[in-house]
Amino acid sequence: MSQVAKPKFREYSRHLLVCTGERCTLNGEGQALFDSLQHKLRTAGLGVDAGPLRVKRTRTGCVAACKGGPILGVQPDGTWYYNVTDENMDRIIESHLKNGKVVDELVFHQGKPSCTEEASG
């Protein structure tokens, strides 16, 4: 019986979930957003070489929020953005990812704080 290797991620600060499901956008805008993120994050100093500041990105299928796409989730913050155009993504990177300030007018759902935040607050 072979032993399964334990996976390991590089260190990162946040994880972006980009919905590329067909119900959010009809013309592939979610996939285009995902494709643009690697360059945008590197340019902002949050890319693969940013150490603990790195922002990880993952393409997802439907997240059951089928209007107003492209949809972007920021974890562990529990923040869900809608209408994430190229320009709005730049705002999210600068305000939320770099400076910790949520772009309120683009948020359609804010989850509960993580267990760590609750324990320290």
Image (cartoon, helix red, strand yellow):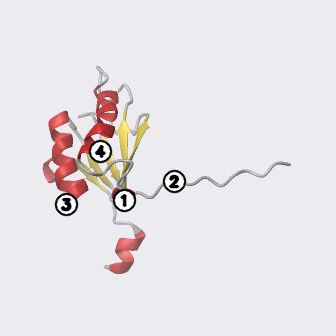
**Pointer 2 with pointer 1, Cβ within 8 A:** no
Q: Which residue matches tag 1?
A: 13
Q: Quadrant of residue 28?
A: top left
Give the secondary structure at mark 2. loop
N-terminal of the two: label 2 or label 4?
Answer: 2
Of the residues under marks 3 and 2, which one precedes in the sequence? Answer: 2
On residue 99, the disc is 3
User: For this rendering, which residue is in front, 3 or 73?
Assistant: 3
Q: Earlier in the sequence, mark 4 or mark 1?
A: 1
Instruction: Please count the marks in the image.
Output: 4
Mark 3 residue type: Asn
Contact between labelled residues 1 and 4, with CB atoms less than 8 Å apart: no
| Three-letter code, disc 1 | Ser
Give the quadrant of residue 78.
Answer: bottom left
Q: Which is closer to the viewer, label 4 or label 3?
A: 4
Instruction: Quote the CA–CA distance across marks 1 and 3.
Output: 12 Å
Instruction: Give whichever of discs 4 and 3 has the lower sequence position.
Output: 4
Residue shown at the point (39%, 78%) measured from the top left? 119
Foreground disc of the pair 4, 1: 4
- Quadrant of residue 36 within the rendered picture: top left
Q: Residue furthest bottom?
A: 120
Place of residue 59 in the rendered image (x, y in percent of width and height, measured from the top left): 41, 37
Q: Is residue 24 left or right of residue 9?
A: left
What label does residue 42 carry, if any? 4
Question: Are the two marked residues, 4 and 3, in contact with CB atoms closer than 8 angstroms?
Answer: no
- Does residue 80 appear to the left or right of 87 in the view shown? right
Q: Which residue is mark 2?
A: 9
Dot 4 alpha-carbon crowd within 10 angstroms: few under 14, some 14 to 19, many 20 or more: some
Vertically, is 116 above or below 48? Answer: below
Name above or below for residue 100 compared with residue 42: below
Q: CA distance from mark 2 to mark 1?
A: 12 Å
Question: Residue at point 25% right, 54% down?
Answer: 97
